Amino acid sequence: MPSRVLSSAKAKRAVIGVAAAASLVGTLASPAQAATTLMPGGKIYAGAVGDTTTIQNATGTTVGVHSYGRLEGSVPQGRMISLDSSATWRTVANAQPGSAIYNNLVRWATTIKARGGTILLAYSHEPELSSKTNMGTAADFKAAYARVTTIFRQQGATNVKHTLQLTDWAFRTSPSDRVYAGNWYPGDAYVDIVGADAYNWYTCGEGRGNWVELSTIIAPLLTFGKAHNKLVALPEFGVTKDSRRAQWLTNAKNYIVSNEAWFAGVYYFNHPPTNLKNADCVWNLSTWAEYSAYGSLLKDVNFAY
């Protein structure tokens, strides 16, 4: 891993983290508590979902990994891990010592604790989607999220940053909408980082023919994070194949760096669509210009893996 020189980000993030406790809506109880949300070294973790090897070979730099795993299975490697389960949220929320769910959560917690280093963990990503209505209500999700966080903390997994992973639309829609982020927010006591999966669909999948910059897509996420004095993350972000993709990535990097004090992690979705409705989207990077643009982010002094 190439050496890194600490930028002013660490000091900047520390100042904002403390000041925000006194000035923002929905703050934590004290500046000391606010400071605990900062990432080690003032860095932003950067990487990808899916094919990290090609990005690494094309850019000549280390690529952080965001992986996905099931509670019932093994704990995958990754700087960020999304944890899902076949159990309903209410079942997880009610998990008691000795039950299979409780034992699996303890196994995950102790495994990640033993690895050391900061790990971003997202329980039941994108819970607001209609495809997850069989998992329960928003209240059930919040109770389950709190239970997972509590069990991890009871096991002493202090290296885990509990990350809420919603879609970008959850932050952009009206508060009256069922999927609005505020309806799914488990509370400041249980969330360390607020994340959004952000995509520029353009004309594919859910797109409506509008080319949208990342800054526009995630501005509401940043507003929400600041209101709760929480760092933000992009567990997934992507842009469908287009001649403007390299410039879009460059603009994305510039926006993230300009707001670096509030970012914890960013992971490009270098993976084929996982939903048949979006089968025509091409997220994987493919040209030298695109790899160069994303490689510039990975090699930036403010980013780590």
Image (cartoon, rainbow, N blue to C red):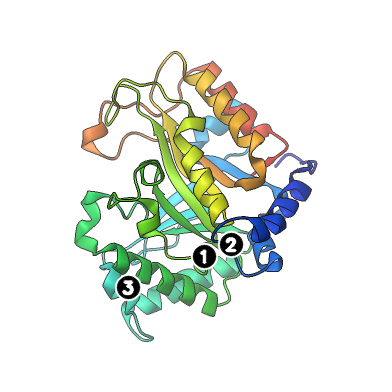
Amino acid residing under circle 1: Asp
**Residue on which the image places disc 3:** 92
- Mark closest to the chain's N terminus, 1 or 2: 2
Residue 98, relative to residue 4: is it above or below?
A: below
**Residue on which the image places disc 1:** 188
Q: Are marks 3 and 2 in contact (CB under 8 Å)?
A: no
**Whole-percent x, y for residue 291 in the image:** 54, 24
**Whole-percent x, y for residue 182 in the image:** 40, 56
Q: Nearer the viewer, residue 116 or 281?
A: 281
Q: Are marks 1 and 2 in contact (CB under 8 Å)?
A: yes
Amino acid residing under circle 2: Thr
Q: Secondary structure at mark 2?
A: loop
Residue 73, relative to residue 196: is it above or below?
A: below
| Drawn side of residue 254 relative to residue 152, left or right | right
User: Within 10 Å of the Cα at label 1, are there few (<14), some (14-19), or many (20+) other Cα atoms?
Assistant: some
Q: CA distance from mark 1 to mark 3?
A: 20 Å
| Drawn side of residue 178 relative to residue 305, left or right | left
**Residue on which the image places disc 2:** 27
